Every structure is written in C-alpha cells, then in structure tokens.
Amino acid sequence: MRDYVKMLLHPDPNVRPDPHELLKLSYFQDPGVSALQSLDELRQLDNLARSRFYKNLRVSIRILPKRINLHRVYSQLSEEFANPTMVPFVLPPILEIVDKIDRDEFTTFILPSFQKVLCIKEPVQVT
C-alpha cells in the first residue's frame, strides 16, 4: 500500500497508478471493505439482489468495527424501514449490530429509528 501511495504522490503523472490498479490491491479485497463498497451501490439494486446482500451482511458486521457498524452500516439499513417488504431482510444484520453495542448506544442511535419497525404490520414475516 505504501508503494502505491508514493506512486500516487509522484510529480510525474505517467508514474501514478490508475484507479483500476488501486482497486486490485489486497486492501480493497477485504470482506469488510467489500461490504462497505456494496452498501454504496445498494440503492441501484432491486429488492431480490438487496435481500441476498443483507443475508450475507451479518458476516461482514462481525468483522467491521463497532463505530462503522453503528454509524455507517446501520444508517444505511435503517433507510429500508420505508420499504416494508425489505424489513425482514434487514432485521438480522441490525440485530447483529445491536449485539455489539451497549445500552446507551442502542438508546441513542438505534431506538429512535427502530421504533418505526415496531409498528409495521406488513409483510407477514415481521409479525
């Protein structure tokens, strides 16, 4: 990684690597980093593709730091509360995040938006 940073800072543009070369670095192949990249692209996917991603997200949540899970991953997952058909798929990763935080963090960051889910009657899987 250091070599690539040095190359990026090089005054000669011909020596600098292009973005595609950087994405091939092992640093960006990390499961946690891959999950965060996929989160960024999630809005472009249909419900079926998003549900598949959410099923596998729990593994990445175990790897990612608590702060990233709480502020980055949860905020993205909570946006799905507006789409009741996706709520059953985002609940397992959210509960995985809840397992990693303390009571104060839950009360401050999770509960205010999570209360909306407690009132949902559709789809049937939620009740």
Image: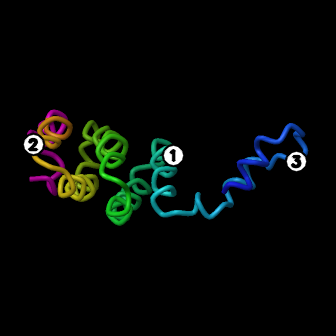
Of the residues shown, which amino acid type is indicated by label 2? Leu
Choose mark 2 or mark 3, whichever is in front.
3
Label 1 packing within 10 angstroms: few (<14), some (14-19), many (20+) = few
Residue to which mark 2 is pinned: 118
Q: Position of residue 100 (x, y in %)?
A: 21, 56
Question: Does 114 appear in magenta?
Answer: yes
Residue 95 appears in which quarter of the rendering?
A: bottom left
Q: Nearer the viewer, residue 9 or 43?
A: 9
Q: Residue shown at 27%/57% (left/top)?
A: 93
Callouts 1 and 3 close, C-beta under 8 Å: no
Residue 41 against residue 100 in the figure, above or below: above
Q: Which of the two residues, 125 or 23, is positioned nearer the viewer here?
A: 23
How far apart are the two marked residues, 2 and 1, measured between alpha carbons? 27 Å
- Return the residue at label 1: 41
Magenta span contains residue 18: no
Q: Is residue 55 above or below residue 101?
A: below
Residue numbers of the magenta segment: 112-127
Within 10 angstroms of label 3, few (less than 14), some, or many (20 or more) residues? few
Residue labelled with disc 3? 15
Give the spatial CA distance, label 1 vs label 3. Answer: 30 Å
Of the image marks 2 and 1, the number of the one nearer the N terminus: 1
